[in-house]
Image (tube, rainbow, N blue to C red):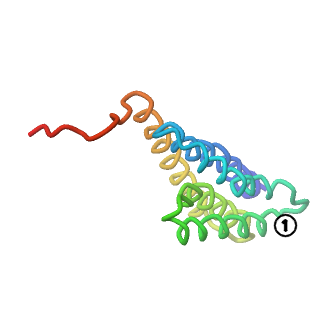
Amino acid sequence: MARRGEARALAATAVPCAAVWLLWPVAEDGEVLLSVLLAVPSLLVLLPWRARTGEGFADCCWAVGWLLAGSSVVGAPFGLFLLLPAGVLLLAAGFRARPGSGRLPVVLGWTAAAFFLLSGLWLLYACLVDPLPEGPVPFRG
């Protein structure tokens, strides 16, 4: 039973990770269109919560996790890499929800969640506190 609760907690962590990483282009250079376009596929993160059984939850986490992670790798030049944190966390939740899974998926999942949340928050902070200057950067040498 604890396995199912840990998997659901990991899947719930995918939502703030997706939100933080989708806010980064807006904070960096005001690129709202990319975040709006990526908000639609990132809503797939909520799909595992519609599952009625534990096995359905695991299958849904796997399917959505592979879809988000795979599309982020293939579509990296188009900005889809922003969906990678949510995909990785859903994959970890799917592995943890499987019967007979060990502690490794939950440890790796929480480590990835901490890394993605902290790095995303650091990027947001860096963009909001010290924005890039307009035009060419002067040489300081």
Badge 1 element: helix
In this view, 49 is above or below 31: below
Say left or right for 62 vs 136. right
Q: Answer few, some or many: residues within 10 Å of disc 1's Cα (few below 14, many 20 plus, some between 14 and 19).
A: some
Q: Which quadrant would residue 85 be assigned to in this image?
A: bottom right
In this view, 29 is above or below 18: above
Residue 7 x, y percent position in the rendering: 71, 56
> For the point 54% across and 72% down, which residue is it?
74
For the C terminus, the quadrant is top left
The residue most toward the front is 135
Q: Which residue is mark 1?
A: 56
Residue 50 x, y percent position in the rendering: 87, 56
Say left or right for 30 vs 49. left
The residue most toward the right is 52
The residue most toward the left is 141
Which is nearer the eye, 19 or 101?
A: 19
Amino acid tagged 1:
Gly
Residue 62 x, y percent position in the rendering: 71, 68
Which is nearer the eye, 78 or 68?
A: 78
Residue 51 x, y percent position in the rendering: 87, 60
Which is nearer the eye, 27 or 20?
A: 27
> For the point 55% across and 50% down, which residue is it?
113
Which is nearer the eye, 12 or 138?
A: 138
